[in-house]
Image: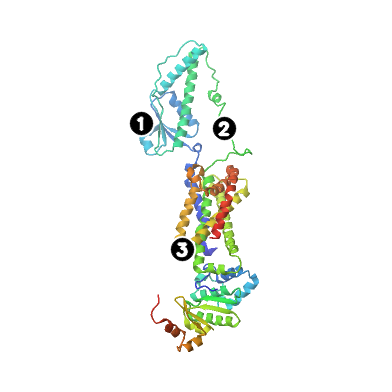
Amino acid sequence: MRRDLGGLALLFLMPMLLIMIMALVQDGPFKDYKDRKFETLLLDQDHGKVASEIKKGLLASNQFDVVDSIDGKEVDLKLVKEKIQSGSFQFAICIKKGISAEIINSGNIIANQIGKKIGIAGTLPHRESRDSMNIELMFDPVSKPAFKIAITNAVEKLIQKAQSEIVLERIAGLSPEQSSDSSFDFEKTLRQVGVQEISSQNNNAAISKMNSVQHNVPAWAIFGMFFMIIIISESMISERLSGSWTRIKLIPGSFSHILFGKLFFYVVLGIIQFYLMLLVGVFVMPLLGLDAMQLNHSPLVLLFFVSCISTCAVSYGILLGMLFNSSNQALPVAAISVVILSAIGGVWVPVEVLPPLLKTFLLYRLCVGACKASIPFYCDKASSSILPFRPYCFCWVLRSVYW
Amino acid sequence: MVPQQIALYPTLSCSENLMYFGKLYDIQPQTLKNLIAQYLHDFGLEEHAHKQIKHFSGGMKRRTNIIASLLNNPTLLILDEPTAGVDVHSRNMILSFLKQYNAAGNSIMYTSHLLEEAEVICHEVLIIDQGKKIAQGNPKTLVKNHAVGNLEELFLQLTGNTVRD
C-alpha cells in the first residue's frame, strides 16, 4: 500500500475530493428556487393597496425578503438600477404611481358590469382604462430565463390576487347595506382547487428531490472511475517497454486469461471506488452542509450498472495502453477523452439538457444509466435504458482486449 | 526467454516479482517458493529478496531478470544480452550459472555483442552482420580455420574495420 501512494490517491482521494468540490460548487445552481430566499428590492411609488398586497404576499411565501429602504431612505429608481447592476439584488419590483388607482378603476368597471347583470342598483365611479400601466420587474442581467419566468409568475399571481380582492370589495361597495361576511376566507376559497406534485413511481414512493448531491456524487464518481484508465494505460505501456509484456505473452497458456485477470482486478477496484464515493455522498456530504445522498432500493441494478461502467473504463484503459507507444502520447488522450466522454455522458450536466445531437451518441446511455441507477426515482428508467446497450459495452471490452 | 530489458515490476520486491511470474506459469505455491529460494541462493540474492526492484543495482536486476525466466525450468533458454551493463561479479556469476545450466542438459541460445563471452560459453556460434549470416560453427574451430586470435578478430576480418551505424 505504501509503495504507490500516488496511485492510491489517484484512485480514491482524488475522486473523493472531486465529488465533494463539485457538489459544493454546484449546490447553488442546483437548488430549487423554492429552497432559496431572495432579497427583493421594492420600489413603491404608488403607496397604495397593490404594493402592500405584493409586499404581504412576498413575505408570506417565505421565499423573499422585501427591501424598500436602504440606510433609512426609501429606494428610488436610480438606486434600484445601481443595486441591480452591481449584483446586490437579483431583481426589483417597481410599482409606478397610479397602479392602485388603475386597478381600483378596473375593479369599479367590473363591479358595475356584474352589478348591472345581477340587478344591484348603483354604480361606482370610473373612467376609461389605460393600457400602459405595468408593474415593472428589473432583473440582474445575468439572471437565467427560468428564474425570470418563475419570479414573473409569482408576481403576476400576487397582482391577480390583489385585483380579485379589489373587485370583490368593489362589488360589496355597490350595496353597502348588505355588508360582506367578515368571516369569509377569500384565500382559502381560492385554494380549494390547487396544484399538487405526485410520484411517477408505482409504489407511491415519496417524491425525491434532485439536488447537487444526487447529481454530482454518482456523476463524478463515474468520472473518477475513469481516472483508472491513466493508471492502466501507463502500466501497460511500461510493461510493454520493459519487456514484461513479452515475458507474459511467452508464458504457455491462453493470453486472454491473463488479460481478463487484469481486467477483473481493475473492474473490482472500480466498483469498490464507486461504492466508496457513494458512502461519501451518504455520510460526508451532510457534514459539508449538503443533503445526504439517497440511494435506490435496487442494489443489484446499481451493481450491474457499476460493473458495466467499470468494465468499460478498464477496457478503455487497456485499449489506450495497447494503442499508444508512450505515456506521453497516452496520458493527454486519456485525460481529454475522459472529459469529452463525461460531457456527452451526462456527467457535467443532466443529460436532459444536452442538445439532441449529443444525445444520439451511443456511449451516453451507459453513464446516464449508472447515474440514474444511483437515484431512486430513476431506477426503473435506468434499467430499461441499459438493456439495449449491453452488446456495445461488451463489444468494446472484446475489441480492447484483442486489439 | 530472458529479454534484454529488465522485464520486472520496479515497485514489487524481488520475491514478489518471481512469485507473480511463477504463478502465471501455474506452478504450485510451495514448489514455487522452494524454487525461488533455490535460485535466489544460486544468484546471491537471498538477502535482497524483499527489496523492491527499483532499489536494485543493474547486476541484481539482471540476475532477477534471468531467474524469472528459469522458473518453469525451460529446456531451451533464450537470452538477449543478459550481461549488458552489469558489474564484473554479476557477469561472472551469470556466465557460470549458464555453463552449469547447459551442463545439466539444457540448451541455451545466447545473443551478445560481446564475442569473448560467446567464445567462453558457446559450443556453436552464428555471427550475423547487417542481418546476414557471415560465419557459423564451433568458436575454436572458427578461430583456427580463419587463423585469427579470437572471435573478435574474426569478426573484424570478416566485416572490415569501418564503423557501422
- Can you say whether B60 is above or below A340 in the image? below
Whole-number angstrom distance, CA of label 1 to CA of label 3? 64 Å
Nearer mark to the viewer, of 1 and 3: 3
**For this rendering, which residue is in front, A171 or B69?**
B69
Whole-number angstrom distance, CA of label 2 to CA of label 1? 38 Å
Residue furthest to the left in view is A78
Q: Which mark is on residue B87?
A: none
Q: Position of residue A150 (x, y in %)?
A: 47, 34
Residue type at numbered disc 2 = Gln
| Residue identified by numbered label 1 | A77
**Mark sitting earlier along the chain (1/3):** 1
Q: Residue at x 55, y 63 (%)?
A: A1
Residue type at numbered disc 1 = Leu
Res. A183 image quadrant: top right
Judged from the image, the secondary structure of the residue bearing numbered disc 1 is helix
Residue furthest to the top in view is A121
- Subunit under mark 1: A
The answer to whether residue A69 of the structure is visible from this angle is yes
**For this rendering, which residue is in front, A346 or A254?**
A254
Q: Position of residue A271 (x, y in %)?
A: 58, 54
Residue type at numbered disc 3 = Ser
Badge 3: how crowded within 10 Å, few (<14), some, or many (20+)?
Answer: some
Q: Position of residue A298 (x, y in %)?
A: 62, 47
Whole-number angstrom distance, CA of label 2 to CA of label 3? 59 Å
- Subunit under mark 2: A
| Residue identified by numbered label 2 | A196
- Can you say whether A45 is above or below A121 in the image? below
| Residue identified by numbered label 3 | A326
**Mark sitting earlier along the chain (2/3):** 2
